[in-house]
Image (cartoon, rainbow, N blue to C red):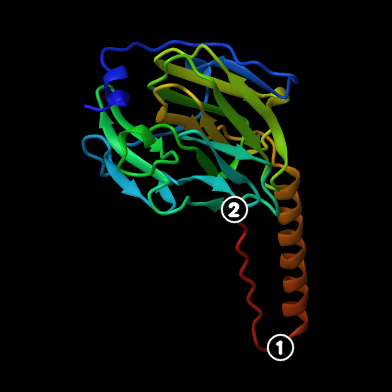
């Protein structure tokens, strides 16, 4: 049994507070989140630690997992990954090098997704010491995750908009063995499209679950723009058809959230 798995035996859930210089994102109780969707890794092939290695982007329930976003750099901090910089040209998820992306394995509390640190798969000291990033299919106003395996931190979470701009970077210390964490965007703004995570915990940390998908009560500005464009095109098509005695005009639109 690896040092990571040993740390996970016989644990309970708890909360902790994040340090923050700005009030863009507030930490809230995980159980208070209203998201309708979740991701866990029970249906993903894993097995006993070090589990199953994934060198490519892993998609579960419409959410994509990889190492970092395009424009960020990943450097070594001993055996740990450290993410530097902000994404560029929008959020594009990038997998790490072979053996340095993510793995999924069965820990005592359940299946865990692990970033793979600098030693690489299948080294036991790589498990939980690598970075991972999460890309949603649409903008979120709340987000929750369950981290496992901590021996006190530190750990870091970066929240990003769809254009790659940073919303906020949060740092943590004194993390309990299993941490159920909730985060809520100030004012309920729906603009969290991606999250990056890395740590320097002595035993490393993995991801057991996330919670997301808070419906927006009012369409976002980009959604309004697409709707207005669609209405305009429909009206133009109707007028065009009214003037024509024959033929047909078909318009197909594909809007990606």
Residue identifier under label 2? 92
**Furthest residue in direction front, as rendered:** 78
- Mark 1: secondary structure: loop
Which residue is depicted at the point 59% across and 38% down? 83
Nearer-the-camera pick, 175 or 31: 175
Is 214 left, or right, of 230 in this rendering? left
Q: Nearer the viewer, mark 1 or mark 2?
A: 2
Split into 4 quadrants, where in the image is the N terminus? top left
Asked if the residue at tag 2 contacts the one at tag 1, i.e. Cβ–Cβ closer than 8 Å, the answer is no
What label sits on residue 245 in the rendered view? 1
Residue 17: percent from left, percent from top: 58, 11
Rate crowding at label 2 as few (under 14), some (14 to 19) or many (20 or more) other CA atoms within 10 Å.
some
Question: Which image quadrant for residue 230?
Answer: bottom right
Q: Position of residue 223 (x, y in %)?
A: 70, 49
In the rendered image of this protein, does residue 71 appear above or below residue 186?
below
Residue 217's x, y, as percent? 65, 33
Give the residue drawn at x 55%, y 50%: 93
Q: Is residue 7 left or right of residue 73?
A: left
> Looking at the image, which is closer to me, 242 or 178?
178
């Amino acid at each position: 049994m690896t040092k990571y798995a040993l740390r996970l035996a016989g644990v309970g859930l708890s909360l902790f507070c994040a340090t923050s210089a700005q009030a863009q994102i507030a930490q809230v109780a995980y159980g208070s989140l209203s998201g309708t969707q979740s991701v866990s890794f029970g249906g993903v092939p894993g097995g006993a630690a070090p589990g199953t290695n994934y060198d490519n982007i892993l998609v579960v329930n419409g959410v994509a997992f990889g190492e970092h976003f395009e424009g960020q750099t990943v450097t070594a901090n001993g055996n740990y990954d450290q993410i530097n910089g902000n994404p560029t040209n929008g959020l594009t998820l990038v997998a790490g090098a072979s053996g340095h992306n993510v793995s999924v394995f069965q820990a005592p509390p359940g299946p865990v997704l692990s970033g793979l640190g600098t030693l690489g798969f299948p080294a036991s000291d790589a498990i939980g010491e690598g970075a991972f990033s999460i890309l949603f299919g649409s903008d979120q106003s709340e987000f929750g995750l369950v981290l496992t395996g901590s021996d006190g931190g530190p750990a870091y979470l970066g929240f990003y908009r769809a254009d790659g701009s940073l919303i906020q970077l949060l740092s943590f210390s004194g993390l309990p063995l299993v941490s159920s964490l909730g985060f809520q965007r100030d004012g309920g703004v729906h603009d969290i499209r991606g999250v990056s995570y890395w740590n320097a915990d002595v035993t490393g940390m993995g991801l057991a679950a996330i919670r997301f998908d808070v419906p927006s009560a009012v369409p976002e500005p980009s959604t309004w723009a697409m709707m207005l464009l669609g209405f305009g095109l429909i009206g133009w098509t109707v007028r065009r058809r009214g003037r024509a005695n024959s033929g047909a005009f078909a318009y197909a639109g594909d809007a990606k959230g």
